Amino acid sequence: MGTRPWDLVTNKRAFLARVLEAAGAIRTLEALADSRRSVVLTYHRIATPGPSNPFYDPTVSATSESLRAQMAMLRDRFRVVPAERLIDPPDSADPRPLAAVTFDDGCRDNFTAALPVLREFEIPATFFIPTDYLERPRLPWWDHVAFVVKATRLERFTIPRAPDDPAPIVVDLTDHDRSAAIMGLIRPILDGEVADRDGFLKRLEDRAQVDVDSRILGRDLFMSWSHLKAMAAEGHAIGSHAHSHVALGTLSDHDARRELALSRSILEAAVNRPVRAVAYPYGWPGAVSDRTFRLAAAVGYRVGFTAFEGAVRPGLDPLSLPRLNVGGGDSPPLLRARAALWRTLGRSWL
């Protein structure tokens, strides 16, 4: 059987969104949408994925060019406000639905690449910062893994999950695309199969024969405090991403409270203004829970954001708001269609 035309479409979601847009279906969905529902977009890095990016490609949300196109769409279709204002929106005669733009992790490209685009379109954003990574720059573990796999000259090696692992992970790099090999190392850590993550990273360096200067690489990857202050001075909001980017739902009450409170106090001292918004690291079920939301409220946060997909609607706990994660394949029509589906149907199949 020959190749079907549909099989040649590399980004099927974006293709379907373009079809919906051309047919006027997105406009119809927008007209039917609940005007009280708003959307929050989650960005991470603004860069170019692939061989030129030495780190973990899935954390790249957009290139500078695609971010510019997305912000143009957002400016035209939505009234964009700081994330915290979604639960208490300012009075306005503007009939457009509300949206907010957020950036997680505090990477330097948020300042060098995203900020000029936001400035161009006069769009306010909220930047959620894991304060320990600005205080002690280093590579996050997922970028550490990706850096090693992309840098190694070996085509094949094994890496035990623990020193006595009888069935180590086989890393096969004979394929030019190394993304599958990287995910094969990321997944065991996310699934809790690796008890000593730092030891695992050291074994990975040794087996792959790659030296990693995590502090120097981290210093270039993350923003500095002066970057953060400059963004705050331009009117952008600064929020917490906890202190050390850990899954708060896996910690004791004491440790989770400390993560939330310490990050907030450090940020308030740095930017000299109240910090009332938090985006929970990872943010998926298990990484957060109702207990996490209660602890966030107890230490003074007014609004909190998860990684649950959805639109913000009346009646939701303001400490457990959903967002729409932006990925490298999200074209402006696709983002517009996803937002319209969530605001109209309460779900999205794109």
Image (tube, grey):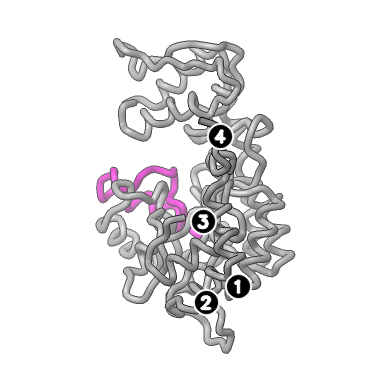
SS assignment at label 2: loop
Q: Choose the circle earlier in sequence order: 2 or 4.
A: 4
- Image point 36% across, 28% down: which residue? 188
Nearest to the eye among marks 2 and 3: give it: 2
Does residue 259 lie above or below 333 as drawn? Answer: above
Is 185 on the left-hand or right-hand side of 122? left
Q: Choose the circle earlier in sequence order: 4 or 1.
A: 4
Tag shown at residue 42: 3
SS assignment at label 4: loop
Q: Choose the circle earlier in sequence order: 3 or 4.
A: 4
Dot 3 amino acid type: Thr
Give the extent of the magenta segment.
239-265
Real-space Cα distance between discs 2 and 3? 17 Å
Nearest to the eye among marks 4 and 1: give it: 4
SS assignment at label 3: strand
How packed mark 3 is, by other alpha carbons closer than 10 Å (few <14, some 14-19, many 20 or more), is many
Residue 62 lies, in percent from the top left, at 62, 49
Dot 4 amino acid type: Thr
How packed mark 4 is, by other alpha carbons closer than 10 Å (few <14, some 14-19, many 20 or more), is few
Residue named by callout 1: 77
How many numbered marks appear? 4
Q: Choose the circle earlier in sequence order: 2 or 1.
A: 1
Residue named by callout 2: 97
Tag shown at residue 3: 4
| Residue nearer the viewer, 10 or 175 | 10
- Image point 36% across, 14% down: which residue? 168
Residue that lies at the very extreme toward the bottom in this rendered image: 93
Dot 1 amino acid type: Arg
- Image point 58% across, 73% down: which residue? 78
Asked whether the residues under the numbered discs 2 and 1 touch, taking CB atoms below 8 Å apart as contact, a structural biologist would say yes
